[in-house]
Image: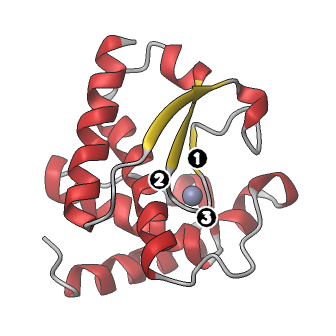
């Protein structure tokens, strides 16, 4: 878990600095405390707390790019809590299919940010279309282009 938390903390600090948002407190939680037991991590609606599924933290998965994707995504939700109204009408994943959930504006934006971070830092692109379908991927790609044009980094 040490390696895992080192990567998690590095990803959180880098993302919060880049996005100019406060660093959240981090709490390891039981799977039952999240919207679904397989949710890797989540952010409180005020952006102040980042929750990490104990199974994710202890699963032995120290794939750096995957952890960075998950944490970059969550840190973008923190940014949303401070800078955007994308959470209007937001529904958590227990009420929706994977495709429906990830087609919400807040999710598109958070995945787009994750894609940008992985592309710029690791020179890889996550193959999200395999999970969410071509239509959602098109929205994510579009949003990633918009964010890139803002020239944040
Ligand atoms: Zn999300």
In-front residue for pair 43/36:
43
Give whichever of discs 3 and 1 has the lower sequence position.
1
Q: Are marks 3 and 2 in contact (CB under 8 Å)?
A: no
In-front residue for pair 32/110:
32
Q: Nearer the viewer, mark 3 or mark 1?
A: 1
Residue 39, by quadrant, is: top right
Q: Position of residue 85 (x, y in %)?
A: 56, 84
- Give the residue number, with chain letter if any, for mark 1: 42
Ligand 1 is found in which quarter of the picture? bottom right
Q: Position of residue 122 (x, y in %)?
A: 17, 47
Secondary element at tag 2? helix
- Give the residue number, with chain letter if any, for mark 2: 74
Q: Nearer the viewer, mark 3 or mark 2?
A: 2
**Is the CB of the residue bearing disc 2 within 8 angstroms of ligand 1?**
yes
Q: Position of residue 80 (x, y in %)?
A: 47, 72
Query: Position of 93 compared to 47: left or right?
Result: right
**Is the CB of the residue bearing disc 1 within 8 angstroms of ligand 1?**
yes
In the rendered structure, find residue 133 and report the number of the disc placed on it.
3
Give whichever of discs 3 and 2 has the lower sequence position.
2
């Amino acid at each position: 878990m040490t390696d895992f938390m080192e990567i998690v903390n590095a990803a959180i600090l880098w993302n919060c600095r880049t996005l100019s948002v406060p660093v959240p407190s981090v709490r390891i939680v039981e799977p039952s405390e999240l919207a679904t037991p397989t949710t890797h991590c989540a952010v409180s609606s005020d952006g102040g707390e980042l929750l990490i599924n104990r199974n994710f933290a202890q699963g032995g998965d120290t794939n750096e790019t995957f952890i960075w994707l998950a944490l970059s995504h969550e840190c973008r939700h923190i940014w949303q809590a401070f800078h955007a109204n994308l959470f209007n009408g937001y529904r958590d994943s227990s009420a929706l299919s994977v495709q429906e959930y990830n087609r919400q504006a807040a999710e598109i934006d958070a995945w787009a940010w994750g894609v940008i971070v992985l592309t710029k830092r690791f020179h890889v692109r996550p193959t999200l279309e395999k999970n969410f379908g071509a239509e959602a991927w098109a929205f994510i790609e579009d949003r990633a282009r918009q964010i890139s044009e803002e020239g944040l980094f």
